Amino acid sequence: MDQERDQGLTFFIDGVAYTAREQPDLNWLEPYGKVFYVFDQQTSGNLCFGVEGPYGRLFIKYAGARTVRYMGKREDAILTLKNAMPLYDRTHPALTALRGHGPTRDGYAAIFAWQDLPALRTYPPSDRIRRQVRQLPFRDTLKMLDGVYDLHVQLAGDGYIAVDFWDGNILIDFLRSQAIVCDIDLYRKKPAVNDRGRMPGSSRFLAPEEYEMGAVLDECTNVFAMGALAFEFYGDNNDRGRESWIGPPALYEVARKATQMKREKRYPTLRAFLNAWREAVGRTPLEE
């Protein structure tokens, strides 16, 4: 029997419990196999599933359910997911692989390859994975960061600005020394402006203009986020002081410049940031 919980009701699919405000029609999932996990606490308005079946293991993101942590309109969640699909239409080692997408009777679904990988920032909030990353050789962590940075240079070249970029959307593949961005649904086409006052995402990654209604959001804004990621890997992303930096010294100055509060003191573009980062890496002796 369904029970009220966290302002919602408990339902089951293939024996797996999940919470929603009302029971959605999920019959369209059946051809993909058996659900083995449900992500029901997303603030995006999406209900997400781990499914195993004839197409292997899949991660299926569905907009159309009335989820418990989403305060917006169901129609807006559907439109956001549908409009994000061109963003995933690229092959890059730092981006999760899209397998397909399309409408369902009551919403929209996007199908991705399942990534059995932990996020850099887990939920509930924990530093456990970040501590493991910090124990890796610099050669491995530099490869991870370079992939994420290169992806965002490519996205910027295609006219997109990152929104809601933070460490909870970054998966860590320890075996391949890769960081994989798993959620770029809210990225926007240029030109972009702050229309929310406080933009989505973690405060640790938000540039000052992401708190200012009407402010321009551009590559310089995203440079701040990329620098903040470097501090998650090698420093303290709250105070960004030199004394807490454990990474190669040459990279500290690049990360610090990237995270300046005044826009004019940052790198103006993601390409300029990545060039400076790679030049500093080239001056860094790394163990074999």
Image (cartoon, rainbow, N blue to C red):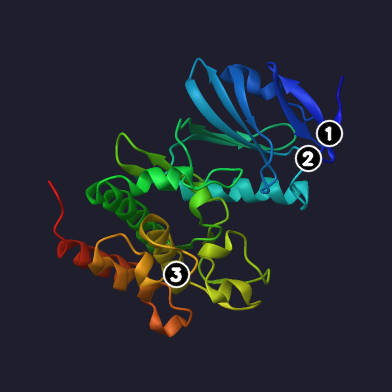
Circle 3 crowding by C-alpha within 10 Å: few under 14, some 14–19, many from 20: many
Q: Quadrant of residue 13?
A: top right
- CB of mark 3 within 8 Å of CB of mark 1? no
Q: Residue at x 73, y 39 (%)?
A: 64
Please determine whether, in this image, residue 262 is positioned above or below residue 35: below
Q: Disc 2 residue type?
A: Arg
On screen, residue 115 versus residue 122, left or right, reads left
Please determine whether, in this image, residue 78 is positioned above or below residue 222: above
Please determine whether, in this image, residue 255 is positioned above or below residue 2: below
Q: Nearer the viewer, mark 3 or mark 1?
A: 3
> Label 1 belongs to which residue?
22
- Where does the image place residue 25, in percent across and percent down from the top left? 76, 27
Q: Residue 224 got which mark?
A: 3
Q: CA distance from mark 3 to mark 1?
A: 40 Å
Which is nearer the N-term, disc 3 or disc 2? Answer: 2
Whether residue 266 is visible: yes
- CB of mark 1 within 8 Å of CB of mark 2? yes
On screen, residue 23 versus residue 78, left or right, reads right
- Where does the image place residue 91, in percent across and percent down from the top left? 36, 43
Q: CA distance from mark 3 to mark 2?
A: 34 Å
On screen, residue 5 versus residue 101, left or right, reads right
Q: Disc 3 residue type?
A: Phe
Q: Quadrant of residue 229?
A: bottom left
Kind of element beneath mark 1 = loop
Q: Disc 1 residue type?
A: Glu
Q: Residue at x 69, y 45 (%)?
A: 78
Q: Residue at x 78, y 40 (%)?
A: 66
Kind of element beneath mark 2 = loop
> Label 2 belongs to which residue?
66
Q: CA distance from mark 1 to mark 2?
A: 6 Å
- Where does the image place residue 59, in percent across and percent down from the top left? 54, 31
The residue nearer to you, when weighing 1 against 222, is 1
